[in-house]
Amino acid sequence: MTGKHRPVGVVIATRDRADSLAVTLRRLLALPERPLVVVADNASSDGTRAMITERFPEVRVLALPVNRGALARNDGVRALDTPYVAFSDDDSWWEPGALSTAARLLDAHPRLGLLSARTLVGTADAPDPLNDSLAGSPLGPAADLPGTQVLDFLGCAAIVRRSAFLDTGGYHRLLFFGAEETLLAYDLAARGWGIAHCPEVVAHHHPAPVPRAHRSAVVRRNELLTAWLRRPLPIALRRTRDLAVAARWDPEARRALRAALRARKPLPPHIERAVRRVEEASRER
């Protein structure tokens, strides 16, 4: 899909959320930037693909044969050739002008690999709690980056430099879905790309309720797998017991741990030090 005249494309990964996806697509296609939009459909069974074809013919659909979770975003990025790619979920969209602002920031800062936006939640436009955490990052500013340096972001409020995203391999296959953003941030930083929180770029998120216990278990498992994939051995070992707890609800957890051990590649020392600074600041809040 060509993006010669539009610097930012949008990728949405979805599964069985046709109604909310339709709202998101209407919002995105009404933006003054008129971005190219790719929907990576994770084998939906609710008529999602037919809905897009009928109501939004300008949107490209990647009809994935199975549910690939967050990896569907990787497929979407590869389907575009725009220099920058914004991620939306099927319940989120971008403020008018946000994509143009992001493109200017990315143009002006060649080392910037990922831009984290400010997120407003629901019809009341309530600030997402993550906004303050990112804005207050102990990593502070960098001379060659806008905003504040961070090592995390919200998946539906991020805009990436496509070449940087592909340089890292994108979202990791082991995490599937849930807290997958942190590992991508680590991998971008490890390869020299900057990650910055830029509150002048705004995303809107209208999430549907998710069962808390299930979401918490998924996040815990993926945080622990991330530790085994990228953190020093003593840190990973301290968290192994929690992974065993996660395995009680997820029979795939032990298999994922074995795969993580095979794929283990600890962060460079300077990035590990930055991660510890962020963790220490989080504990002090």
Image (cartoon, rainbow, N blue to C red):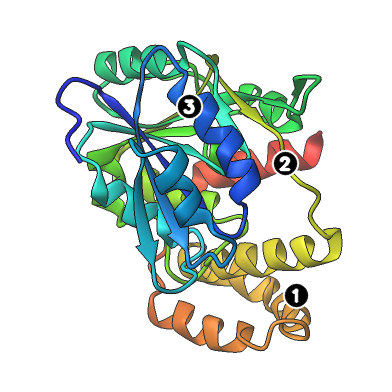
> Residue 276 location in percent, x, y?
59, 46
Position of the C terminus, as image quadrant, is top right
Q: What separation in Å lies between label 3 and label 1 (alpha carbons)? A: 40 Å
Q: Tell me: 200 left or right of 134.
A: left
The residue labelled by disc 1 is 242
Q: In this view, does 199 lie above or below 27?
A: above
Earlier in the chain: of badge 3 and badge 2, it is: 3
Three-letter amino acid code at disc 2? Pro
Quadrant housing residue 132: top right
The disc at residue 125 is none
Indicate the secondary structure of the residue bearing disc 3.
helix
Q: Tell me: 94 left or right of 164.
A: right
Residues packed near mark 3 inside 10 Å, few (<14), some (14 to 19) or many (20 plus): many
Q: Tell me: 20 left or right of 87.
A: right
Residue pictured at 85% horizontal, 65% vertical: 213
Residue pictured at 47% horizontal, 16% vertical: 98
Indicate the secondary structure of the residue bearing disc 2.
loop
Earlier in the chain: of badge 2 and badge 1, it is: 2
Indicate the secondary structure of the residue bearing disc 1.
helix
The disc at residue 207 is 2
Residues packed near mark 2 inside 10 Å, few (<14), some (14 to 19) or many (20 plus): few
Residue pictured at 76% horizontal, 68% vertical: 217
